[in-house]
Amino acid sequence: METAFSGSSDNTGTSLAIQNDSKIILGGGSYDPYLSSGFKLARYNPDGSLDQNFGTGGLVTVNIYNENGIITSINIESDNKIIASGISYFTFIGHFATARYNTNGTLDSSFGVGGVASFNFDRYSESYASAIQADQKILVAGNSWSYSYKAPIILRYNNDVVLPLTFLSFTATKQTNTVLLNWQISNESSNNYFSVQRSNANNKEFVEINKVYSKGYSLPGQSYTTTDTKPFQGWNYYRLKQVDNDGKSNYSHVTSVLFDNNGTMVLYPNPTDDFIYIDGLQEGVKSDLFITDVNGKKVAIANTTQSMYKFNTKNLPNGIYYITVIENGKTLKRKFIKQ
């Protein structure tokens, strides 16, 4: 029998299966996450020669998510498609990994994401065994462990799709004038896009403020981010609606952030002559504005939903004045000088 795996001494064959036409499948790779080695398959004819109709010269290498890994078990389906399961190393952390190959050695794109399914149980995970049930669902078994313990794990896949998309985290972080939204997901297979939705304390109805399309592949812990450029004054509530290619959807949990523009309202020019601008108002929110003199008498009144407003001060006597802004029940006050 010819040697199929070569290069690093850590490349090894660890699993074997025989097709119904008596051809032999050998699977392997590398246990070392630092080596450049992925899932490796070789197919031999019954006489021991490499099957030239399989992959390149009888050999196929797949680096799952451009990382290293090793095949630890192989199953052959009735149509001679190959199910190879094992370990993929993503950022040096082990994940359950399963790939399905067509009879010519190419990945079967009808399975998982581009022929590959990968899953991590929030710890170091390693798969060592697999089987195909009578209903063609795929069982993958192994261990998930941390520094303190190791636990047995069994994962079951449908024959054509992987586990549904899972939200690992979703956070909202206040920036200077915006809110940064970040989320991590796993099992991204048929995802089309995320609808980013927002509500506030006064209106519980969520409204879409952005749409973020799928990156098209599923790295374990895949990250997405977007920015709310016009948050409400006060509490902002956010959620994600994940929409599949077939229109099915599910929601993330709700996260919130308190956005307070106190201190960001700017008046210019100050001192002023003919006009004074108020900048830093909340876009889309009604702002009630008025100018008072030092005795508290209102000398000008206005309202706006824009982020900026211009008062005509040309007819005001010279002196000290105050501009008051009321937004969502909150009052801001600033002093300016007319000269």
Image: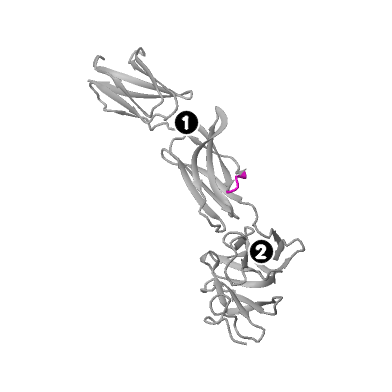
Give how far across and how far down residue 201 sits, in percent.
55, 29
Residue at image location 67% in from the left, 84% down from the top = 46
Residue type, numbered disc 2: Trp
Q: Disc 2 versus disc 1: distance between alpha carbons? A: 45 Å
Q: Could you classify mark 1 by the number of other residues whose Cα lies within 10 Å: few (under 14), some (14-19), or many (20 or more)?
A: many
Front residue of 250 and 115: 115
Q: Is 337 situated left or right of 146 in this image? A: left
Image: 148 above or below 314: below
Q: Which residues are magenta?
A: 245-249
Front residue of 54 and 199: 54
Residue at image location 45% in from the left, 42% down from the top = 227
Q: Are marks 2 and 1 in contact (CB under 8 Å)?
A: no
Mark identifier at residue 233: 1
Image: 232 above or below 196: above
Image: 46 above or below 94: below
Q: Earlier in the sequence, mark 2 or mark 1?
A: 2
Most common SS among magenta residues: loop
Mark identifier at residue 145: 2
Q: Is 238 situated left or right of 19 in this image? A: left
Residue 153: in sight, yes or no?
A: no
Q: Is 253 situated left or right of 174 in this image? A: right
Q: Secondary structure at mark 1?
A: loop
Front residue of 139 and 339: 139
Residue type, numbered disc 1: Gln
Count of numbered marks: 2
Q: Could you classify mark 2 by the number of other residues whose Cα lies within 10 Å: few (under 14), some (14-19), or many (20 or more)?
A: some
Give how far across and how far down residue 315 sits, in percent.
25, 14
